[in-house]
Image (spheres, helix red, strand yellow):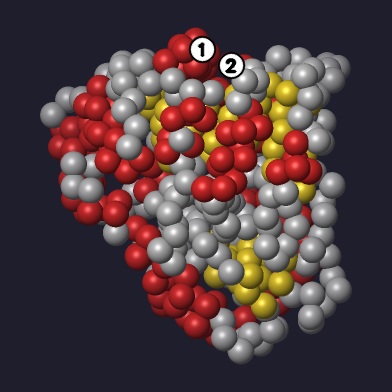
Amino acid sequence: MKFNSKLPNVSTTIFTVMSQLANEHGAINLSQGFPNFDTSENLKKLVNHYITSGKNQYAPMPGVLALREQLSSKIETLYGLQVDPNSEITITAGATQALYTAISAFVKPDDEVVLIEPAYDSYRPSIKVNGGIPKAYELSGPDYKIDWNQLRKLVSVRTRMIIINTPHNPIGKILSEEDMKSLDRLTEGTDILVLSDEVYEHLVYDGLQHQSVLRFPNLWKRSMAVFSFGKTLHATGWKLGYIVAPDYIMAEFRKVHQFNVFSVNTPMQYAIADFLVDPNEYLSLPSFFQKKRDFFLEAMKGSSLKPISSEGTYFQLFDYSAISSEKDTEFTKRMTTEFGVAAIPVSVFFSNNNDNQVVRLCFAKTEDTLSKAGELLQKI
Ligand code: PMP
Ligand code: GLN
């Protein structure tokens, strides 16, 4: 049979490729971002409780109301915004589905979407499969700051959406209040939607504050903010998340959502609603992960890999340009096969495969794993 692929240049994601390579070579896997420790026992008990007590049929299309109410109150406490749990929050099958559905609900053929590269790998294919045209703004290290005057040049009458990601995967930087104000000014009075990927909202370090679009009431009127329980609950395999948007935007989102997934896992939604009643669970995440970041940096002291400061996320970048001129894709393969630690090459997050000889390592791991990885990487 003949057909034209809608995504001719897409192959298996780097996360799958590197995790597989790590498994084949028995390497420590600091490539794909996931914790190697378990989610809370209390949360597992709650899930068991709701499964055995019979919460096993379809959830309402936008999600279990108790969970949406809990999230609404969390958002008000953290960001000072009142969102209607009925019409402005939808529970999704992870952030990936929320992002895909948001893009497909609004991006029509030949609409332009501005994204900031390096960019999380799902954005570009989600735009392209819907006929949209990605317009990439390129960040450069080691600061990775956005020059809003330059970014503005990518905006045209065809711009339908701007996608931002803070804290940023893969670079580990966060957007500042000034950045958000620049974004507000850039989009004010236009029909440009902002899709804000905030899956690492609680993984922000050194006393910095997460600048959610939900903190900026004007900006929020044209925004969708996406979150993931995978990161907040150490449960990436549950593939549960949510999206928050003003009702007139959410109504459009739900038109697609109800036909691409309808509703998501019921007992887990009830369990998470109960679990979130105690805010300490998520308020302790910055110090929990900052400790891991600092432990890992200590374990890497003396290695030839040069750290680039991480302000948030699961990830720490390292520059290896002082010791090798290899492409980052080759270097990460060799790290895995010869040195026993798998990493992600940052060039794969650029559409032109811009290679700055920087690799991404995930520190959402036990101290034992981090110190073993540090020992192995001293040998590079
Ligand atoms: N956005 C970013 C920036 C991510 O890092 C990830 C996954 N790590 C996702 C979206 C997808 O999240 P989920 O697993 O909830 O689909
Ligand atoms: N988001 C995770 C990462 O950046 C991986 C998710 C996936 O494997 N698709 O490592």
Q: How far apart are marks 2 and 1 (CA)?
A: 6 Å
Q: Residue at x 46, y 35 (%)?
A: 216
Nearer the observer, 177 or 214: 177
Tell me: residue 36, above or below residue 147: below
Nearer the observer, 19 or 94: 94
- Location of the N terminus by quadrant is top right
Q: Residue at x 82, y 31 (%)?
A: 8
Q: Which residue in the protein does label 2 denote?
A: 105
Rendered location of residue 368, percent (x, y): 41, 77
- Location of the C terminus by quadrant is bottom right
Horizontal side, residue 358 vs residue 51: left or right: right
Rendered location of residue 364, percent (x, y): 45, 63
Identify the secondary structure beneath mark 1: helix
Amino acid of disc 1? Glu
**Dot 2 and dot 1 residues touching (CB under 8 Å):** yes
- Disc number at residue 252? 1
Tell me: residue 105, above or below residue 179: above
Q: How crowded is mark 1: few (under 14 residues within 10 Å), some or many (20 or more)?
A: some
Identify the secondary structure beneath mark 2: helix
Is residue 86 visible to us here? yes
